[in-house]
Amino acid sequence: MLFIVMVTLFCEMGAGQQPTAKLTLNDVLTLANQHNLDLVAARAKRAAALAGVRIAKERPNPTLTVGGSRDLPHENVLLDQSFELGLKRSKRIEVARGEQALNGYPRPPDPKENPRSFL
């Protein structure tokens, strides 16, 4: 009996020492927005669409190949740089922008098209 009373007193003392945090409506809405899986997926999808345009604008990297053989000459070095013909880069960028528009994201402004809008 004494044991049950002691356990009850210790539980009440421990519960009394921990203050409960009160959440406001703004805190609850912020937490809900941060932990909503649909919103997290939509943000990731938008970031992927924007990154697709940025990746499409990249130019191919050069390739350096170094090798050796038992025949003469023993060493060889090859530097390779591919050149895109037929406006492949601009077509690739337009495809990426089209995919971005199909996903429902507006096209971001391009400073090359209207430079005065960024001044």
Image: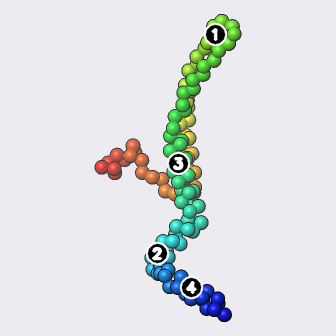
Earlier-in-chain disc, 2 versus 4? 4
Task: Using a 10 Å C-alpha cutoff, classify the residue at mark 1 as few (fewer than 14 neighbours), some (14 to 19) or many (20 or more).
Answer: few
- Mark 2 lies on a secondary structure that is helix
- Report the label total: 4
The residue pinned by badge 3 equals 51
The tag on residue 19 is: none
Residues under numbered marks 4 and 1 in contact, where contact means CB atoms less than 8 Å apart? no
The residues tagged by marks 2 and 3 sit, at their Cα atoms, a distance apart of 31 Å
Q: Which residue is mark 1?
A: 74
**How many residues crowd around disc 3 within 10 Å: few (fewer than 14), some, or many (20 or more)?**
some
Q: Tell me how far mark 4 sits from mark 1, CA to CA.
A: 83 Å
Query: What amino acid type should be assigned to the residue bearing mark 2?
Result: Asp
Q: Nearer the viewer, mark 2 or mark 3?
A: 2
For mark 4, give the secondary structure: helix
Q: What is the number of the mark on residue 10? A: 4
Task: Report helix, strand or loop for mark 3.
Answer: helix
Mark 3 or mark 1, which has the lower sequence index? 3
Q: CA distance from mark 3 to mark 1?
A: 44 Å
Residue 28 visible: yes
Picture residue at 51% right of the left edge, 38% below the top? 58
Q: Earlier in the sequence, mark 1 or mark 2?
A: 2
Residue 87, can we see it?
no
Residue 27's tag is 2
| Furthest-left residue in this view | 119
